[in-house]
Amino acid sequence: MAERLFDRTAGREDITQVDEIKRTTGPQTTNGRRWEVQLSATPPGEWLDLFKVSGESSAKALPKRVEFDRASAIFTSDEDQVEHWIESIDKWIASTNARYLMTLERVRRERFDRIDAETKEKERVQRLNDRFKDL
């Protein structure tokens, strides 16, 4: 699955280091049902894909039910479940950060290996051309 998610980033040169996404505020509401927390940055699409399939969930708190709008996460909950949602969101964010960074590292390694193989092949071809240039 991560293979599919990161195919679109495999050729990018800027996959080196990313800052972890963190929750920066407590929950805020305007109506007592829809809650919003601010994040340290806008999560990339690949991160969001991983977040939606985060591990642990409960009958009331599911990662698929969290909506993202730029650098904020939004969820719907009764006030008695808000603390549970926040604990769950924090766990999902931590888990997603770890999986996202591992996947970025794998993509970086694969790109390095591919470039290394291409360089070796170019050198081999050049040696062959040099060897037979006077024939």
Image (spheres, rainbow, N blue to C red):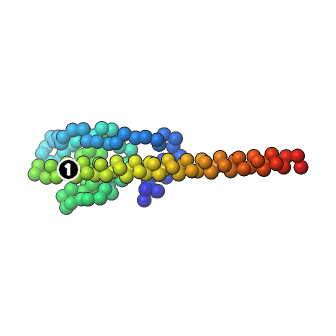
**Which residue does the image show at 44% across and 54% down from the upper left?**
5
Of 98 and 2, which appears nearest the observer? Answer: 98
Above or below residue 27? Residue 50 is below
**Which residue does the image show at 47% across and 43% down from the upper left?**
15
Outermost residue, left direction?
Answer: 80
Can residue 70 be seen here?
no
Amino acid type, callout 1: Glu
The residue where tag 1 is placed is 87
Picture coordinates of residue 59 (x, y %)?
19, 61
Outermost residue, bottom direction?
Answer: 59
**Which residue does the image show at 57% across and 50% down from the upper left?**
113
Picture coordinates of residue 55 (x, y %)?
29, 58
Left or right: 119, with 9 as reference point:
right
Left or right: 89, with 15 as reference point:
left
Left or right: 61, with 104 as reference point:
left
Picture coordinates of residue 61 (x, y %)?
21, 56
The quadrant in which the N terminus is found is: bottom left
Outermost residue, right direction?
Answer: 135
Residue density around tag 1, few if under 14, some if 14–19, many if 20 or more, within 10 Å: few
Can residue 91 be seen here?
yes
Of 35 and 20, which appears nearest the observer? Answer: 20
**Which residue does the image show at 44% across and 48% down from the upper left?**
104
Picture coordinates of residue 9 (x, y %)?
48, 47
Q: How many marks can you see?
A: 1
Tell me the SS state at disc 1.
helix
